[in-house]
Amino acid sequence: MSKTIAMALLVVGVIILSIFGWQHQKAKQLPLAGNWSSGCLVDGNKSKEFIMAFGKDTYRSHAKLYDNQQCQGDTVSEYHGSAYAEVADAHLKTCDGSDAMLLTLYWDNNAQPKPLVLQHLPNNTLMTGYPQDKTPEGSSGWCIDKSTVYTPVAQ
């Protein structure tokens, strides 16, 4: 009799652990997948391009700086980075009242986790957020940078 009870408890335990594991794995999936580019951004006599790539639970960034205004030819510098990403807040309210998504990025270089705020628009473009200055009341939040729109990159 005690073997039957022990076996039943073991089966129940395995089922519970499986459910928790499945829920945990399900929560890791990012709601975005693919690559988005800022296009060529001109800054004085230089130009730059930023590319963001999202996988199941990863964020990759690629930044290029050019010594011309066309984002062509050899780069002056490049930056590649990758981070484990998870959704910290899927419905973050921005300073203008719109919805955005807050990701937490855990970079490969073991630095402190960093936030990334994204607004995914119905036309499949992205805009990023920046921290809002504290108000006199002491509150702060996130605003959306509408000056740079990231468009999907065809693969």
Image (cartoon, rainbow, N blue to C red):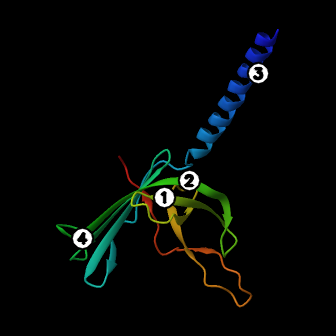
Which is more foreground, mark 3 or mark 2?
Answer: 3
Q: Where is residue 98 in the image (x, y as percent from the top left)?
A: 67, 68
Q: Which residue is drawn at 57% across and 45% down?
A: 28
Q: Mark 3 points at which residue?
A: 9
> Callout 4 environment at 10 Å: few (<14), some (14 to 19), or many (20+)?
few
Task: State the residue position of label 1.
Answer: 106
Tell me if 40 is positioned left or right of 30 in this view. Answer: left
Mark 1 or 3, which is nearer the eye? 3
For the residue pair 30 and 23, the one nearer the viewer reads as 23
**Which circle's residue, 1 or 3, is located before the other in the chain?**
3
Residues at circles 3 and 2 in contact by the CB criterion of under 8 Å: no
Q: Distance between the residues labelled 1 and 3?
A: 38 Å
Q: What residue do we see at 17% from left, 67% from top?
A: 74
Q: Is mark 3 on a helix, strand or loop?
A: helix
- Position in image of residue 138 (x %, y %): 71, 85
Q: Do the CB atoms of the residues marked 2 and 1 lie less than 8 Å apart?
A: yes
Relative depth, front residue between 20 and 129: 20
Q: Name the residue under label 4.
A: 77
Left or right, residue 15 beside residue 55:
right
Q: Residue furthest front?
A: 2
Marks 4,1: beta carbons within 8 A = no
- Mark 4 vs 3, N-terminal side: 3
Q: Name the residue under label 2.
A: 86
The three-letter code of the residue at mark 1 reads Tyr
Task: Between label 2 and label 4, give the one nearer the viewer.
Answer: 2
Q: Is mark 2 on a helix, strand or loop?
A: strand
SS label for mark 4: strand
Direction from residue 80 to residue 120 in the image, left or right: right
Which of the two marks, 4 or 1, is nearer to us in this view? 1
